[in-house]
Structure formats: structure tokens, C-alpha cells
Image: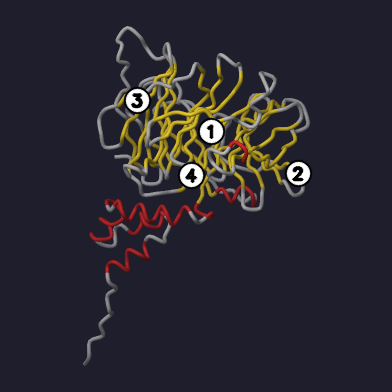
Amino acid sequence: MTESLTPALPFDLVAEILCLLPVKHLLQLRCVCKSWNYLISHDSNFAKKQLRLSTSNHDRRHLILTPTSFSSEFLLCYFPVSSVFSNSVSTQLIRYPLIINYGDSFGEVSTCHGMLCFGIDESLALLCNPSIRKFKILPPLQNQNPYRSYLQTFYTLVYDRFTDNYKVITVSFCKKVEVNTHTLGTDYWKRIQDIPYQCFIQGLGVFVSDTVNWLAYDICSSLWHIVSLDLNKESYRKLLQPLYNERLNTSITLEVLRDCLCILSHGDKFSDIWIMKEYGNEESWTKLFSIPYMEGRGFLGYCQSVYISEDDQVLMQFLKMGKFSLLVYDSKNDTLKIPEIQNVNGRMTPNTYIESLISPF
């Protein structure tokens, strides 16, 4: 009697195959054996490769809805972003029981490589990866002057390829705009050069091309421009936005779409989406779409351009009758459609992200 032996694959080849799988399947495969568990749960090189392959796959992109109110339960709602355009949305909920409760609201949410960073208050932030259900509270951001307190702080999560690590960049308002950085794996914040312009910062930063960018209102000129921080040099520059010569009669927001800086400007009947096709080249600002406003009572305008599909459908967040909702604009047919999404309330903010194995620790 001959014994049939199944040839074993080399472990390197096994790793190559596994990194092609989505995160939810990998998490289920951790129980196969100790070597698979270590690879999936602890190997940072494997996590980076899996993320890189997922980034190039549009079907791996998810829409995640994050809360604006803080409670003893931290609730996330997420689903494939492609399902919004096909109107076959099936949402999943993630619930985190939280022991601590520092305040009654979250700040804006910054996403990078599957991780999310929430400002809890002016000195505390929450960092989490919902895919692997890990989260941590960052060390307190401490003002060097004990007699002053920050009026407001915005937290932006970035990947610094020069150090191959993740950082949280904060801008804090006191008598001037102060900037601090926290590197994951450390227990402290580092103060860097303050923003050298007299300006007010609107919202959190946008991470593009190894830079963090903020929309800023210049006090001297009464114009809106973009302040850019180079992560490698820790130096600043100003960039003109496409409507730089228009004063306070135009409302604008700074975003990122298709890995480019994006300006969403709001007029009387339309909102325009502009992107900077070549980062740093102010001549490359291009208007992609003019999205008409919804008809009917109670429409208060668009708040955010969330995502653009490969066939140029645009997912927008809008405000109507005091409630935030999502809308799809079909640029080819010039039509507006509200997708049917369950388990979503008007107090959750949309962001796109890609599931990853990157740990916040």
C-alpha cells in the first residue's frame, strides 16, 4: 500500500497567495495554523503588501460612516462604495464598547491606509483600524504654556514614506496657529515650526503627495488660499486655489479626490468640483463637474464630494431639512439619485477607506 502525500507549498508562495485576499477573509484564516496567524496578525511587511494590492482594486474601496456624537458605544457603518452606484447597498455595523467618555462629540475624521483618526477634544484623539477592531487613545497634546488652552485642534493622519511610519499632524489655535506631530510607536508630541502666515485654518488637513494641505483664510488679503506642509522638509508654502481672486461671495471646501487636491465651490445654483491634476502646479486646476442643486424645499446645499467612480458618477453629501444624506450625480446623464441605504442616520459623516491590516499600535 502506497501512502499518498500532498506536496506542501513553500511558505513564501503561501504568503504571496494570501496577500491577494481581502482583510475579512484573512482574519478568518488566522486560525489555520500558528504561522498563518503570525503572518496575518503581526507581519508588517505582509500588511503593507496586502494594502498595496488592495489600493489598486476599486472593488476593495469602502464607504465608512463615522459618528459625530460620542457615547459609551462607538458605532461604525460601512459598505463597498461600488454598491452605492449600483443601488444594492448592504451595510455592516461595527460596535466598540468604550470604557472612557471624554466629551460629547467627535471632531472631523482623517483616514489613511485603513486607519481612522478622530479628534475627541482639543488635546485628545482616538486612532483605530475598524477592519481588525483595534483602537487606542493617543497621548495628550499638551500646551507648553500652562496658562493657555487651545481653542480648537484639528488632527490629520498621514503616512510619512521618508520614515516609513504613520504620523498625526495637528494644527491648534491659540494666539497663533501651532503645529505638532505625533509618530506612531512613541508616547509624545513634537512641536514644529508654526504656520508662518496670518491666517485662519478651515477644517483638518488633506494628505497628498507627501504634503499636508489646509484651506486657510488670509487675514491680510481677505482671500482663501491653501497652506501646504512638506513632511520631509517640515517647511510651508502657499498654493493658489482656482477661485483665488474671488472674495467672500464664494464658499469653498478643500478635499482629496482621485489622489489629487480638490476644491468644492458653491454658487447660487451649482456646486463645482475642481482638481489639481499636477500637485503644486497652480495652472493644472481643472473643473471636472458642475453639479446642480436639488429641487424642492429644504435643500441647504452640498457639504462634501465623497467619491468619483471610474465612470464619472459622483457621490455627494448634502444637507436637507436639517439632515445629512447621500446623493449620486450621474455626470453623463446629468441626473441626481438618492441611494437607499439602511442603518444610516443624519449624524454620521462619510469617508472612503480601504480595509487593511495596519495596526494603530
Residue 286 x, y percent position in the rendering: 66, 40
**Mark 3–mark 2 CB contact (< 8 Å):** no
* Mark linked to residue 183: none
Structural crowding at the residue carrying mark 1, measured as other residues with C-alpha within 10 Å and reported as few (<14), some (14–19) or many (≥20): some
- Closer to the eye: label 1 or 3: 3
The numbered mark at residue 192 is 3
Q: Quadrant of residue 146?
A: top left
Q: Which mark is residue 353?
A: 4
Could you tell me how far apart the alpha carbons at marks 2 and 1 are, in whole angstroms? 24 Å
Badge 3 amino acid: Ile
Gap in angstroms between the C-alphas marked 3 and 4: 29 Å
Q: Residues within 10 Å of mark 3 (few under 14, many from 20)?
A: few
Disc 4 is placed on an element classified as strand
Amino acid bearing label 1: Thr
| 4 left or right of 119 in image | left
Q: CA distance from mark 3 to mark 2?
A: 47 Å
Look at mark 2 in the image and give the residue it sits on: 335
| Picture coordinates of residue 27, whole percent (x, y) | 35, 54
